[in-house]
Image (cartoon, rainbow, N blue to C red):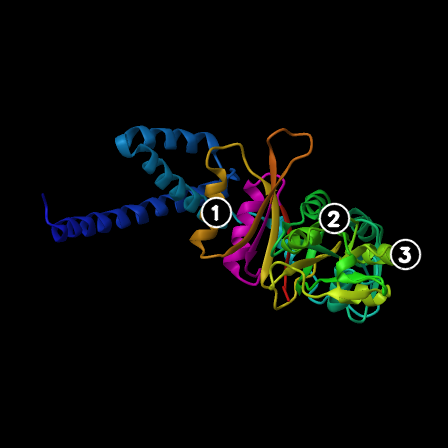
Amino acid sequence: MKDLSEIRVEIDKIDNELIELFKRRMDCAKAVGMYKKASNTAVLNQKRENEILDKVEQMGGEYGAHARLLYSNIMELSRALQHNIVGSGKALRQEIMNATHNIEAKGVKVGYQGIKGANGHEAALRLFPEGEAVGCKTFSDVFEAVDRGEVAYGVLPVENSTAGSVSAVYDLILEHRFYIVGALDLAIDYCLAGLDRSELSDIETVWSHPQSLSQCAGYIARHGFSSLPCANTAIAARDAANEKRLNVAAICSYKAAEEYGLKVLDNHLQDNKGNTTRFIVIAKRLCIPENANKISLCFSLPHVTGSLYSLLCRFNSLGLNLTKIESRPRKGCEFEYLFYLDFSGSVHSENVVDLLSQLSEEMPEFSFLGNYCEL
């Protein structure tokens, strides 16, 4: 048996040979890119890639699967190089270039789901303190109001630190493909609010939005309350005030309790004391502020084994941090999915624009949703 130090010397020697071979292979990929540019040939040739990968796996013997993975990564990097040479993504680059840099904030109408006192109302006021917050009945109604031009922006919850993603909103994002031009992480603090004559010991049933009920599930279970889902936390507060039932309370914000004349019966109900909801701002016009630090995309994936891994390889090669990936079923297509992806970055970086351009050429149903600042 060889000594470890001897094995490491051999590994170092092989690595030196491998890196030189890798450089030669990338030089060849560059030459292929120049040819494809001159002949106006597509960068991706999936048939040839599959043939090479099958051959490599066979030649790899007991390490065949590992060899296939290695060569998949090499091909991703080679293809990225070729995309840059041929100037892929011209339409996307122009779209980014034409973006405005400042959100119109003063005097604009901003749609949110719910009524005064809802968390969405609070988020809209935080994001647009000089705007006019306009309540909409449903999340879909917010998108429709933006689409018809009745409001300039829509403010919507997409994720809670306790209850997770708001799937209905992601479905609407993927359906409408509006731009995301801003985001806010809003700390959520719930109270139990009932009638003036009610006491905590009187309460048997709590009303709130399903997400809020989920965020307070432990509290509800400890008190043995039954729960009734409502369209919105503020609507729950309003309806509890109108129903005038001593045994019913709303789980809502303190502002909602005050707005609808309810008494606070208990404080800080959320199971996670750091409970936070992420809201996004949607618009029909692309705006990319100078301090933009987050990018959102949506796309489907080619029906090729390892396509998601290959996509993630591109981000890893540039040291980019993915902060969210969400898959949603495609309507009318069994077991096919659309993906929503967030990552930290800015289109002011040439590497990032190159990556987006590459993906726009290769990912089916690709949409650049925006580059924005998260507050």
Rendered location of residue 134, percent (x, y)? 85, 59
Question: Label 1 vs label 3: CA separation?
Answer: 52 Å
Magenta residues, as a range? 340-366
Q: Is residue 262 left or right of residue 170?
A: right
Rendered location of residue 133, percent (x, y)? 83, 63
Rendered location of residue 256, percent (x, y)? 80, 63
- Characterize the local packing of mark 2: few (<14), some (14-19) or many (20 or more) Cα atoms within 10 angstroms: many
Disc 1 versus disc 3: nearer the observer: 3
Rendered location of residue 226, percent (x, y)? 73, 48
Query: Is disc 3 placed on a helix, strand or loop?
Result: helix
- The residue located at (79%, 49%) in the rendering is 231
Write down the residue under mark 1: 312
- Characterize the local packing of mark 3: few (<14), some (14-19) or many (20 or more) Cα atoms within 10 angstroms: few
Q: Is residue 114 visible?
A: no
**Disc nearer the start of the sequence (1/2):** 2
Disc 1 versus disc 2: nearer the observer: 2
Whether pointer 2 and pointer 3 mark residues with C-beta atoms closer than 8 Å, the reply is no
**Disc nearer the start of the sequence (2/3):** 2
Q: Quadrant of residue 291?
A: bottom right
Write down the residue under mark 2: 227
From the viewer's side, name the closer residue of 199 and 90: 199
From the viewer's side, name the closer residue of 304 and 50: 304
